[in-house]
């Protein structure tokens, strides 16, 4: 529906700054210009292109070995072609663009998994970084459970508490982070994992939280966080594919 397409467009327009990528904006602006000037380029098409472009931006942010020269020319060509295109088959043209770029990352899953854990680290007083983590986690959680909940109502939660493990390297790693409602997050606060799980995670709307007990957070935190980080990275490589 039109309302759903508008929500998708708004969601990704708000999320692009989280990628901190100047190169991506030339293509983003080209899409927006086309939409403003061409009725044939619909809200549904724009929303789909914004989602794919954002996913591409995340991939090249995490897979650092991708040489910018490999995609910058493709970006410039896409902008030019989009500006000059007067046909109706926007979806086909878009698919060609993303298929070409998918070739740059499709064989780099191992690097994605490794860098995912190294890059996505919670940082105090860095709202943009933490918003990116929240956006990624909620996308994964909604994908698993098909829940239409806006990510703004959720906050990043440390599974193992910051007060008890403040000296540990793993504390702010993605494997030790989840999302909860603001109310649950405040209530859970500095409780131990067993208490958090029984009182909050097991009752949460998302299966990702309900299933946290499959990791040994209470007996082997390092192993639990490592395993969960890998699982999240594996899921993300699939969820944020763009072709």
Image (tube, rainbow, N blue to C red):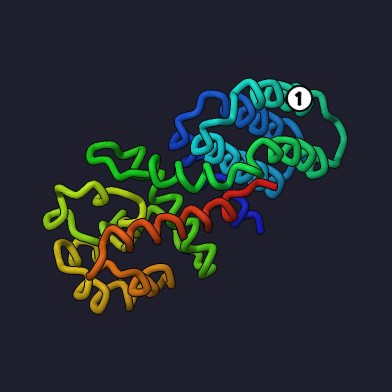
Q: Residue at x 65, y 43 (%)?
A: 107
Q: Residue at x 34, y 59 (%)?
A: 178
Q: Which residue is mark 1?
A: 83
| Quarter of image, res 191 | bottom left
Outermost right residue? 87
| Quarter of image, res 238 | bottom right
Q: Tell me: 164 left or right of 12.
A: left
Q: Looking at this view, is 230 or 75 the one in front?
A: 230
Report x, y in % for residue 159: 26, 61
Q: Is residue 223 above or below residue 52?
A: below
Outermost left residue? 163
Alpha-carbon neighbours of circle 1 within 10 Å: few (<14), some, or many (≥20)?
A: some
Report x, y in % for residue 186: 19, 61
Q: Residue at x 47, y 41 (%)?
A: 15
Residue 39 seen from this side: no
Report x, y in % for residue 138: 44, 57
Q: Is residue 12 above or below residue 198?
A: above
């Amino acid at each position: 529906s039109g309302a759903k397409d508008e929500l998708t467009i708004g969601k990704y327009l708000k999320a692009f700054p989280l990628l901190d990528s100047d190169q991506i904006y030339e293509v983003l602006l080209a899409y927006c210009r086309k939409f403003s000037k061409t009725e044939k380029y619909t809200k549904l098409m724009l929303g789909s292109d914004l989602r794919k472009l954002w996913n591409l931006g995340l991939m090249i942010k995490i897979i650092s070995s991708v040489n910018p020269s490999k995609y910058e020319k493709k970006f410039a060509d896409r902008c030019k072609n989009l500006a000059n295109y007067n046909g109706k088959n926007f979806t086909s043209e878009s698919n060609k663009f993303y298929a070409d770029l998918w070739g740059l990352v499709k064989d780099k899953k191992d690097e994605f998994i490794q860098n995912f854990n190294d890059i996505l680290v919670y940082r105090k007083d860095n709202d943009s970084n933490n918003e990116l983590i929240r956006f990624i986690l909620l996308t994964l959680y909604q994908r698993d459970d098909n829940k239409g909940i806006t990510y703004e109502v959720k906050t990043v939660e440390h599974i193992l508490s910051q007060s008890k493990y403040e000296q540990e390297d793993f504390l702010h790693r993605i494997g030790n982070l989840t999302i909860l409602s603001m109310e649950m997050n405040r209530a859970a606060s500095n409780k131990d994992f067993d208490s958090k799980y029984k009182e909050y995670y097991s009752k949460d709307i998302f299966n990702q939280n309900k299933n946290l007990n499959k990791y040994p957070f209470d007996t082997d935190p390092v192993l639990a966080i490592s395993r969960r980080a890998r699982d999240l990275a594996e899921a993300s490589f699939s969820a944020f594919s763009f072709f």
